[in-house]
Image (tube, rainbow, N blue to C red):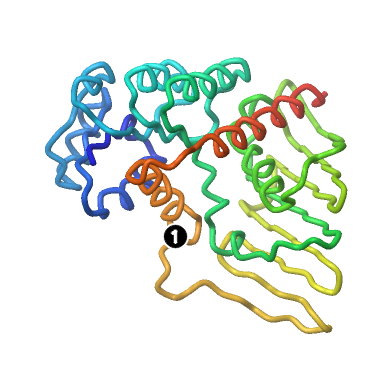
Amino acid sequence: MKIGVIGLGKIAEKAYLPVITAMKGIELIFVTRNNEKLNFLADKYRVNQWLNDVDELLEQNVDAAFVHTATEAHASIIEKLLKNKIHVYVDKPISYSIEETRKIVQLAKDQNVKLMVGFNRRYAPMYKDLPESKDSKIIIMQKNRMNKMKEVREVIYDDFIHIVDTLRYLSREDIDHFDVDSVVQNGKLHQLVVKFKGKNFTSIGIMNRDHGINEEILEYIVPKKKWVVKNLVDTIQLENGEEKWLRSGDWDSTLYRRGFVGVIEDFIKIVSKDLSTINLMNDALETHEWCEKIIERVK
């Protein structure tokens, strides 16, 4: 399988290249305008094909491409790839514009090309292994950052989108009602709390951008049981008045724990076995739609 990797910034270098370059049966082509980074990473991972432009990649008969460029460039790059029947994996979000996101998803459907968005937390073992409960449940997720106040749309689409998608994934039900509480100062988002309500669940997403520590904590509560997942690594199970620690394997890599290994392997499997991504695309679009609704409510 011949795959292009477009954009070699921090997310590609830290989360994707260590996984993709270790997989068998894949021929990689790196694409970036940063020649210094290109030469360094091509040498590091022994990749002997590299290009400076996406248009050059279109001539290489690649099967698929990972898009890790700045979000502002996503739409134009993905459009070129889809129109050339190249399957696409893209970092979240697809775009900061919901209109562009809708158009990209529809284009993938029209072209009968696979499109997958990198919601890695769905593949994180500590989240994935939480039980699917038909009982009423409460889910609380915090994702806090130190001194990271930024413009509202950027924060919600770049970071809070993980909370939205994870809560949707774990609730496994339609959202009937939602509330938003926010603190915005000088155009910068400082705090955000979103409450989703469905037939059998209540979920709350919390983000403080001026926090004392970078952290991610998820609480999953059902009758007589509670799980607390800390930073995707450790889980505390509370039942019958006792605490039980469920830790990740000593030899499990950080990228496996954070779901990157799983999501990358799933995309490769989808492409190699010609599996449909219609449901994945519709689900990813719904997460983007909820982000847009939240932005409209932020004051």
Determine the residue positioned at 74% across, 61% down.
Answer: 219
Question: 19 left or right of 213?
Answer: left
Question: 187 left or right of 54?
Answer: right
Secondary structure type for disc 1 = helix
In this rendering, the answer to whether 52 lies above or below 270 is above
Determine the residue positioned at 47% across, 39% down.
Answer: 276
Amino acid type, label 1: Tyr
Residue sticking out furthest to the left: 48
Determine the residue positioned at 31% across, 51% down.
Answer: 18
- Pointer 1 local density, CA inside 10 Å: few below 14, some 14–19, many at least 20: some
Q: Position of residue 81 (x, y in %)?
A: 35, 22
| Quadrant of the rendering where the N terminus is positioned | top left
Residue located beneath label 1 in the image: 256
Q: Where is residue 197 in the image (x, y as percent from the top left)?
A: 86, 44
| Quadrant of the rendering where the C terminus is positioned | top right
Q: How many marks?
A: 1
Question: 205 left or right of 16?
Answer: right
Determine the residue positioned at 87% across, 36% down.
Answer: 179
Q: Position of residue 13 (x, y in %)?
A: 34, 43
Q: Position of residue 98 (x, y in %)?
A: 63, 20
- Among the 4 quarters of the image, the one containing residue 282: top right
- Among the 4 quarters of the image, the one containing residue 281: top right
In this rendering, the answer to whether 209 lies above or below 214 is above
